[in-house]
Each structure stands twice: as C-alpha cells, then as structure tokens.
C-alpha cells in the first residue's frame, strides 16, 4: 500500500505544479476565490499531507490494518477534495462558500464534509500515536506526537474558516465570506506541515547525535522554536495583521515549513544511502522509526 499512497501523493503534487504553470504562462489572478492558485496550493498541500501521513504512521509503528484504514480514508478524502477544487477552478467558479446553483451548493457541501472526514482521521491518528510505542525512539515519538498536535490545530483553524465563511455566505454576504476565511489562512498553513517538519528533524538528530538524550533535547528545542514562530503567525492572523496578502502569506508559511522538512530528509537520505543490512541508518529509520545505532 505504501507505493500506492506515495504514487497518489506524487500525482497530487504534480497536478498542483501543473496549475502553477498555467498561472505563470496563461496569467490570471493570484488572489481571490477563483484562481489557478487554489488547485496549485491544494494539490501540493494534499500531496504532501498524504505522503506524510503514510510515512509518519509507519515511523510511529502503527499496526498494518489500522494504519491502512487511516491512510486510505485520508487519501480518498484528499483526492475527492482536490478533484472538486480543481473542477471548480476549470469551471471558473469558486469552490468554497458557493451556493449560486444547486450543483455548486452540492460541491461546497461535499468539500465541507470531506474536511470533516480529514479531521476525524487526524483525531484517530493522534489518539493512535499517543498509545505506548516501546519500539520507537523517544525523540521520534515526541516529534510524531507533537506533529499530529500541530496538524489538529491546523484542522481547527480550517474548520473555523469554513464555519465563518458559510455563515457569511448563507446570510447573503458572499464577498465577506471569502475575506473572513482568507484572513485565517496563514494560521492554518503554518501549522499544516509540522507533522512533516518535526519527525524530519528528529531523524536528522538521530543521524547526527550519538545519544538519545541529546536527540530528545534537540527535538524539544526545535518544537519550542516552531511553537513560537507558529504562535506569532497565528496571533497575527487572528488579529488580521499580515505582511502580505493572506493567500501569499499562507503559501510562504506552508512553503517554509515543508521546505525545511524536505531539505532535512533529503540530506539524511543522501548521507545514508547504504543498504540497511550493512548498517545504514536510513532503512531502520524509515521502517521502524528507531534511532540509528552507532558502532
């Protein structure tokens, strides 16, 4: 199943990048409810989230069947969400808070329901990783648990965006619906990929530090720094203060977090490309989430 999940994730990311290409080549607005930006950002974000959930649940040592159910449902819901968002972009109409026609209302309702499915799966995964995991290094386990905590916080901001937007749209304030929802985007974005960033840094610590207590200390330091940065972004977002347009600020927030995480994983992969049977660290880290052992 891993290969299937990672393949679907890669297709989502490529679809998002293709729409970025359309935006750059064909032009069009960056901001607003109708933009190629939406299938771009959602494609990349959903793709990274699916790949991350598949990877991190493996690190945490979840049993195969519960893991397959969680990742499978999350992947299916993400695929439906991205398909509907992309379809509406090609139709030239808003995907969210759009009740102009019966069909658009159905799409908006489906997107809201899909969002709730993602929240439920995230809650279930968070509960699962908080159960005792004796075979997982404490530093990795802390990073995974904290990462799911940030993902839940991101989902909460997403639910707040939907609730505020739907309320405004249903009361006849369509333009206000997009403005209110957009203001919270940076908070939602900065927390979304912490579940990728923190485990990536934990594995990097496992590769560079010889003792588990040092790794645990470094993960705690990284978590504290991330919490401070995310807290500032969330506070400013809730106050309506941004240095750039909310859409731009959200892309920068999510992009910075995920880029640092992927750079750490890439460095780890390139420096441990030895067969696991020969004592390479990447294989054990990838498969069981254990801290690497040094001779």
Image (cartoon, rainbow, N blue to C red):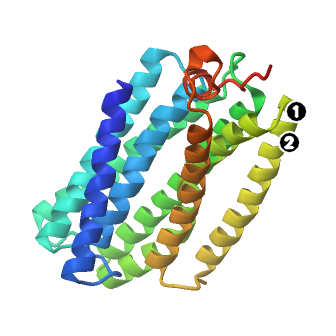
The residue lying at 25 percent from left, 66 percent from top is: 19
Front residue of 107 and 208: 208
Number of numbered labels in the structure image: 2
Question: Could you tell me if the residues under marks 2 and 1 are in contact, i.e. CB atoms within 8 Å?
Answer: yes
Q: Which mark is residue 217?
A: 2
Residue under numbered circle 1 = 213
Across and down, in percent, residue 54 comes to: 45, 33
Front residue of 111 and 55: 55
Q: Can residue 184 be seen from the camera position used here?
A: no
Across and down, in percent, residue 230 comes to: 67, 63
Across and down, in percent, residue 135 comes to: 69, 16
| Res. 279 image quadrant | top right
The residue lying at 38 percent from left, 41 percent from top is: 117
The residue lying at 25 percent from left, 63 percent from top is: 18
Q: Can residue 178 be seen from the camera position used here?
A: yes
Secondary structure, mark 1, is helix
Packing grade of label 2 (10 A; few <14, some 14-19, many >=20) is few
| Res. 93 image quadrant | bottom left
């Amino acid at each position: 199943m891993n290969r299937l999940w990672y393949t679907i994730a890669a297709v989502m990311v490529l679809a998002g990048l293709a729409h970025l290409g359309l935006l750059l080549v064909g032009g069009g607005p960056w901001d607003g409810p109708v933009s190629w930006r939406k299938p771009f950002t959602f494609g990349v974000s959903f793709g990274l989230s699916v790949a991350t959930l598949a990877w991190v649940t493996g690190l945490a040592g979840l049993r195969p069947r519960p893991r397959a159910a969680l990742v499978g449902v999350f992947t299916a819901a993400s695929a439906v969400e991205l398909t509907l968002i992309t379809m509406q972009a090609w139709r030239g109409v808003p995907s969210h808070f759009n009740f102009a026609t019966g069909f658009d209302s159905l799409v908006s309702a489906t997107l809201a329901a899909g969002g709730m499915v993602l929240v439920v799966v995230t809650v279930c995964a968070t509960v699962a990783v908080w159960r005792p995991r004796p075979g997982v290094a404490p530093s990795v386990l802390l990073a995974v648990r904290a990462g799911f905590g940030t993902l839940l916080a991101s989902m909460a901001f997403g639910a707040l965006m939907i609730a505020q937007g739907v309320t405004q749209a249903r009361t006849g304030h369509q333009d206000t619906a997009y403005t209110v929802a957009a203001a919270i985007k940076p908070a939602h974005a900065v927390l979304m990929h912490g579940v990728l960033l923190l485990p990536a840094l934990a594995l990097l610590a496992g590769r560079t530090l010889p003792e588990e207590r040092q790794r645990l200390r470094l993960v705690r330091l990284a978590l504290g720094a991330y919490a401070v940065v995310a807290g500032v972004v969330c506070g400013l977002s809730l106050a309506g203060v941004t240095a750039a347009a909310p859409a731009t600020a959200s892309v920068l927030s999510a992009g910075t977090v995920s880029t640092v995480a992927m750079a750490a994983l890439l460095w780890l992969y390139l420096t441990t490309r030895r067969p696991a049977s020969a004592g390479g660290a990447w294989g054990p880290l990838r498969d069981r989430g254990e801290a690497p052992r040094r001779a």
